[in-house]
Amino acid sequence: MLRLSQAGDYAIRGVLFLASHEQGKILLVRGVAEERGIPRAFLAKIFQILARAGVLKSHQGSGGGFSLARPATEISLLEVVEAIEGSILLHECILNQPCERCGTPGECVIGSVWGRAQENMVKVLRETTIADMMERIRLSDESSNSE
């Protein structure tokens, strides 16, 4: 089963929460964790990884916490996912062309399908920004409130 890890899910939820505040606003991990129902120590580790990846900015000292490193329009969902999960690789045969494992002569048919699927997934994640996600949340909230 292809599945985003719990850390990947928490990373996205945490970044979206930071993006829901004004650009540059510094928030404490504790507040984000409480608001989103994420274990604080786990979120702190995730945010440190995201800061090292350049997605978040870590602020030290008494007013410390985290903020988005760049505007939400400049942060892709792919950046967030790959910072936590590593590079997307749907199947190892994508790396080994021609595939010798499956016994298919020439280019591995299975590998080519996995390769196309991976390309499409990466494209969608690269083209989807945190700002896009925030807009989808806003539109969803508006349609829920109008019902």
Image (cartoon, rainbow, N blue to C red):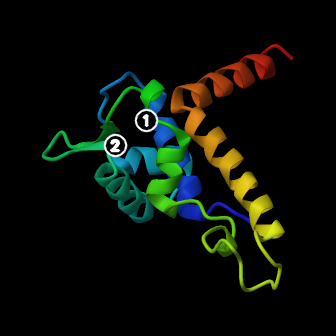
Q: What residue type is labelled 2?
A: Leu
The x, y position of residue 29, in whole percent, is 36, 49
Q: Which mark is residue 56?
A: 2
In the rendered image, the quadrant that contains the N terminus is: bottom right
What residue does disc 1 label? 18
Does 125 sit left or right of 40 as displayed? right
The x, y position of residue 22, in whole percent, is 38, 21
Does 99 sit left or right of 40 as displayed? right
Who comes first in sequence, dot 2 or dot 1? 1
Visible residue check, residue 9: yes
- Closer to the camera, 89 or 64? 89
- Closer to the camera, 76 or 112? 112
Between marks 2 and 1 in the image, the one whose residue lies nearer the viewer: 2
Rendered position, 117 above or below 139: below
- Closer to the camera, 102 or 81? 102
| Local crowd size for mark 2, using a 10 Å CA cut-off: few (<14), some (14–19), many (≥20) | many
Q: Residue extending furthest left?
A: 61
Rendered position, 47 above or below 139: below
Q: Which amino acid does label 1 sit on?
A: Leu
Q: What element carries label 2?
A: strand
Residue at left 78%, top 71%? 108
Rendered position, 144 above or below 40: above
